Amino acid sequence: MSEKEQCEICLKKTDDIKQPVICAKCIDKIASYDICDLERKKLKVENERYKKALERLSRLGNEPHLGNSIGNQIAQQALKGE
């Protein structure tokens, strides 16, 4: 069976095959998606941690309002994506 045929029946049950067939190409894709998903989750957690720190820095010395020092302004600009 060629690689193309394997991919076409990948994860599909056929009359002569009782269990799903997953070709090597699709296994590689699944593994890379799992890794990407894990990395994405790690980055999301890290991003939230940095965002919380920037929010605290943007108000430092003037809580609960935004501060006007240079450090406050740098944090505010980073939060805006500037």
Image (cartoon, helix red, strand yellow):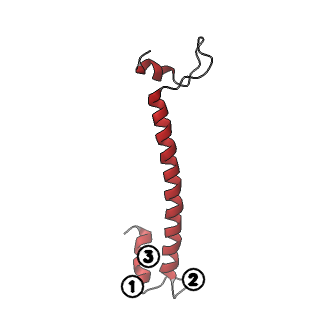
Answer yes or no: do the residues labelled 1 and 3 have beta carbons within 8 Å? no
Task: Tell whether 75 sits left or right of 41.
Answer: left
| Residue beneath disc 1 | 70
Task: State which mark lies toward you, 2 or 1.
Answer: 1
Decide which of 54, 73 is in the foreground and name it. Answer: 54
At label 1, the amino acid type is Ile
Residue at image x 47%, y 47%? 36
- How far separated are the C-alphas under marks 2 and 3? 14 Å
Task: Find numbered disc 2 in the image and state the secondary structure of the residue it sits on.
Answer: loop
Tag 2: Cα neighbours inside 10 Å, few (<14), some, or many (≥20)?
A: few
- Placement of the C terminus among the 4 image quadrants: bottom left
Disc number placed over residue 62 in the picture, else none? none
- Whether 28 is drawn above or below 23: the answer is below
| Residue beneath disc 2 | 64
Task: Find numbered disc 1 in the image and state the secondary structure of the residue it sits on.
Answer: helix
- How far separated are the C-alphas under marks 2 and 1? 17 Å
Answer yes or no: do the residues labelled 2 and 3 have beta carbons within 8 Å? no
- Measured as percent of width and height from the top left, residue 33 is found at 49, 42
At label 2, the amino acid type is Pro
N-terminal of the pair, mark 2 or mark 1, is 2
- How far separated are the C-alphas under marks 1 and 3? 10 Å
N-terminal of the pair, mark 2 or mark 3, is 2
Residue at image x 51%, y 63%? 46
